[in-house]
Image (cartoon, helix red, strand yellow):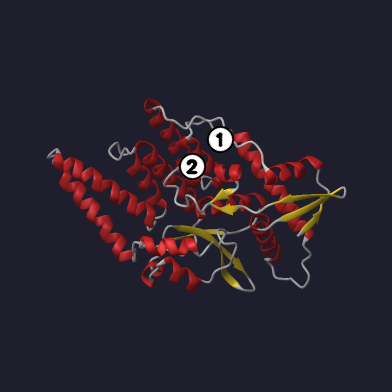
């Protein structure tokens, strides 16, 4: 789609630069960790995220707090905001160019904003300014490290903004941030090893938005390809809409996973504390339940080796969590099934 815009030349020049190459926001950040300071940085981010959750605050802020801990609070907040503002301007320009012919539902404006956001992220958008064409290219899926097993920063929204490649986590987070910024309603929804967007239209009802493949999959397709049981849907484990508080709580889970990736410290209680915060606001969060159970398993084995009397209490709590997951309908997705799902995106 081509837009004839009345924005400043600077804004769309930045969009052009962003599409074809620019300095990476993390380029000059030392990602090595000072173990003596790591706990302090993570605790500060935890406190900030906890405040955002308790006040039903900002998803965007919580994401920055989480990702900033990984870089020992060296990320540029101004750069993060500037990158988002560029995209916000693009989405706004796109929505202003679309004529709502024949659309008179009460939520037409919301649908328009979500449509503009989807196309701005998933399609090439041509911008015309003073007869000069600029192009904003779509974000791409990171096939080389989709689960961030090599580099956890591949989960980050800040990394997505910098290199224009991401996964279901970062792409979906960016969509919700921008939706919040422009006043569009959307909801995060979970599936095994996956997160996506749920939307609602007065005309068509609920529908799914998949950023990794730029598509609108049906619930049946998600169930079939996502290894989701009907029990998991009935219990709210998967395919339910998350409230704003529950969405922000995901950032506490992200913080726990970052901490795990960087420190492999399962024994100081930080990972469990993060999981407990998530479960306080989203008691059926499969990832938080599983991460807490797996962490307790490591703690239990360590306690058993040391003949610690607390091992039996740890064991009971661990088995209770695994039992809860089973009752909720959790099933571990086989690796082959997930790899086939990834291949289907190519």
Q: Answer left or right for 262 relative to 312.
A: right
Q: Residue at x 49, y 47 (%)?
A: 155
Q: Quadrant of the N terminus?
A: bottom right
Q: Nearer the viewer, residue 34 or 149?
A: 149
CA–CA distance in space, label 2 to label 1: 10 Å
Q: Residue at x 78, y 57 (%)?
A: 2
Res 208 seen here: yes
Res 58 seen here: no
Q: Looking at the image, is 10 positioned above or below residue 333? A: above
Dots 2 and 1: beta carbons under 8 Å?
A: yes
Quarter-of-image position of residue 265: top left
Residue at image mark 1? 26
Secondary structure category for the residue under label 2 = helix
Q: Answer left or right for 147 relative to 312.
A: right
Residue at image mark 2? 153
Quarter-of-image position of residue 285: bottom left
Q: Looking at the image, is 244 positioned above or below residue 163? A: below
Q: Residue at x 77, y 73 (%)?
A: 102
Q: Nearer the viewer, residue 223 or 32?
A: 32
- Which mark is first along the chain, 1 or 2? 1
Say the numbered circle drawn on residue 249. none
Quarter-of-image position of residue 290: bottom left
Instruction: Report x, y in % for residue 109.
Output: 71, 62
How many neighbours does mark 2 have within 10 angstroms: few (below 14), some (14-19), or many (20 or more)? many
């Amino acid at each position: 789609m081509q837009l004839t815009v009345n924005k400043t030349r600077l804004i769309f020049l930045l969009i052009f630069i962003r599409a074809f190459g620019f300095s990476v926001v993390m380029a000059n950040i030392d990602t090595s960790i000072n173990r003596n300071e790591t706990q302090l940085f993570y605790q500060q981010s935890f406190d900030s995220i906890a405040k955002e959750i308790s006040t039903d605050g900002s998803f965007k802020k919580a994401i920055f707090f989480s990702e900033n801990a990984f870089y020992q609070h060296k990320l540029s907040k101004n750069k993060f905001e500037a990158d988002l503002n560029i995209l916000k301007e693009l989405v706004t320009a796109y929505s202003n160019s679309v004529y709502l012919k024949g659309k008179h539902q009460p939520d037409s404006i919301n649908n328009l904003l979500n449509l503009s956001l989807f196309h701005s992220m998933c399609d090439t958008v041509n911008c015309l300014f003073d007869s000069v064409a600029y192009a904003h290219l779509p974000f791409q899926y990171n096939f080389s490290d989709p689960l961030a097993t090599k580099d956890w920063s591949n989960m980050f929204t800040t990394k997505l903004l910098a290199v224009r490649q991401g996964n279901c986590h970062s792409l979906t987070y960016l969509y919700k941030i921008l939706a919040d910024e422009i006043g569009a309603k959307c909801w995060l929804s979970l599936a095994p090893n996956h997160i996506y967007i749920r939307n609602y239209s007065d005309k068509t009802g609920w529908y799914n938005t998949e950023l990794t493949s730029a598509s609108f999959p049906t619930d049946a397709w998600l169930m079939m390809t996502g290894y989701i049981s009907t029990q998991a849907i009935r219990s709210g484990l998967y395919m339910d809409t998350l409230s704003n508080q529950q969405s922000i709580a995901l950032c506490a889970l992200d913080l726990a996973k970052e901490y795990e990736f960087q420190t492999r410290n399962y024994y100081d209680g930080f990972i469990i504390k993060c999981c407990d915060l998530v479960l306080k606001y989203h008691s059926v969060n499969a990832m938080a339940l599983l991460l807490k159970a797996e962490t307790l398993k490591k703690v239990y084995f360590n306690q058993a080796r040391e003949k610690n009397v607390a091992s039996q209490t740890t064991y009971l709590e661990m088995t209770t969590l695994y039992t809860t997951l089973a009752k909720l309908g959790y099933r571990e997705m086989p690796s082959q099934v997930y790899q086939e799902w990834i291949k289907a995106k190519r």
